[in-house]
Amino acid sequence: MKMWSGRFRQPLDPEFERWQRSFPYDQRLLPCELAASRTHAQALKGAGVLSSEELISILQGLDQIAAQAANPKFLEDSEAEDIHHFVEKQLVALIGDTGFKLHSGRSRNEQIATDLRLYVRANIDQLRSFLADWIDALLDRSDAAGKAVMPSYTHLQRAEPVLVAHWLLSYVEMFLRDAQRLEDCREHGNLCPLGSGPVAGTTLPLDRAAMAAALDFDAPTANSIDATSDRDFVLEFVNALAVLALHWSRFAEEMILFSTQEFGFVQLPEAYSTGSSAMPQKKNPDLLELMRGKAARIAGQANALMIAVKGLPLAYNKDLQETQEPLFDATETALAVLPMAAGFTRGVEFDFARMEQAAKTGFLNAWAAATYLVRQGVPFRLAHEQTGKAVQLCLEKGCEIENLSVAELQSISPAFGPDFQAALSLEAVLDVHDVLGGTAPIRVRQAIAAGRTKSAALREGVHAHA
Ligand code: ARG
């Protein structure tokens, strides 16, 4: 039986009927729908609409639906309009007309709003736990990299030497921010729409505070018009995923670049690479390329969501059904990417010798050289100029700054002393950056320790699920 056929004289156009159904995708919401329905049933009992026997029978029916759903065949239902209709149909099939009582005093508009909040919340928790795994993989690799050095880049030109660990830790920071953004989103969305009805509030004396508590929400939503039409929590969540995906696409891009023969800094793990059907020598970075590509897709879903809501009159409109697929797609994309990215991070090999070689050539110590002059009392702008002259001389001679003789250097500036060369060794240059957040080894050790503390706090902060 349809949920609304009473006032209609004609059946739906079959093509339209099929096309408007959301069940093919909203069946993902079954666990949320069942949880919200159990809660609503309890509230109906409290309001005197259900007897104790009816409540028990409904709860048993809902449990049975959950059990049967373990078999995917159970979800093959070409009549169900959406997840709400499906559960009602199955409940009535199991327990008879008492099943129809469950819809008393509620509307699908509040149900879908509730289901989606539960879905977003559960996935935030899962994603944060996956992020913690990836962060730990990055921290382990940072630890193991010890004092290995590599060039850092600005404008994709060699800039200054940094510890490999320092580079990896930059991603730890991004993913920690992503985890926090997801938690913020969880907090904003953790309110219960049940009892909002279709738009103006329910017509039965349902205990909204009890329903919110039963579903682990912080409180009931405050306004029924807003509660049934609000999808901010979806927008916020998918936008947070889009930022996360931008971060992972930068990681992917760097790994792709560093795995080229031109860079040769990393070797791709075979477990996450593929060959070419034509060129036998190829090992392609498919995981990384797909990560980069999926970021576009998530950004697109975030955009689709914003446009779906733009200019929508209050309260519920069927357009809101179109917020589901972008949400599911973005969520499932992120859920799939994160564990593989962690696996990749654990498996990728670094060619430290090659990285160090690259860090030693191309005047990456020029800023440290200018800093040496500053310490001798030379004003920075002049120190910059004088170091630039030294670089120019090196370019003519085909050498590095530390290879110039003291006499050559002093012809540029008398401030260059005999201790200048020592100040340009890789170790000395790294140690110049002895500042919180800098790449001096002692600071990087601190940063790894701080990262471990933050990652443990993140794990601790992931909400447990029954
Ligand atoms: N499948 C619908 C959706 O996702 C459920 C709400 C339907 N409400 C309605 N008034 N037709 O939006």
Image: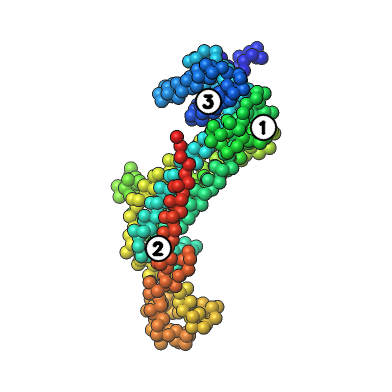
Measured Cα–Cα span from mark 3 to mark 1: 21 Å
Q: Tally the numbered discs.
A: 3
Residue 13 in sight: no
Check residue 445 in the rendering and tell me which mark sits there, or answer none. Answer: 2
The one nearer the camera, 317 or 90, is 90
Query: Decide: marks 2, 3 in contact (CB < 8 A)?
Result: no
- The residue that appears at 40% across and 67% down in the rendered structure is 442
* Nearer-N-terminus badge (2/3): 3
Q: Nearer the viewer, mark 2 or mark 3?
A: 3
- At which x and y percent is residue 293? 47, 45
In the image: residue 237, left or right of residue 7 = left
The one nearer the camera, 10 or 434, is 434
Query: Decide: marks 3, 1 in contact (CB < 8 A)?
Result: no
Measured Cα–Cα span from mark 2 to mark 1: 52 Å
Measured Cα–Cα span from mark 2 to mark 3: 51 Å
Q: Which residue is mark 3?
A: 38
Q: Which residue is mark 1?
A: 224
Q: Callout 1: helix, strand or loop? A: helix
Q: Which class describes the residues within 10 Å of circle 2: few (<14), some (14-19), or many (20+)?
A: some
Q: Which class describes the residues within 10 Å of circle 3: few (<14), some (14-19), or many (20+)?
A: many
- The amino acid marked with disc number 3 is Arg
- At which x and y percent is residue 194? 60, 30
- The amino acid marked with disc number 1 is Ser
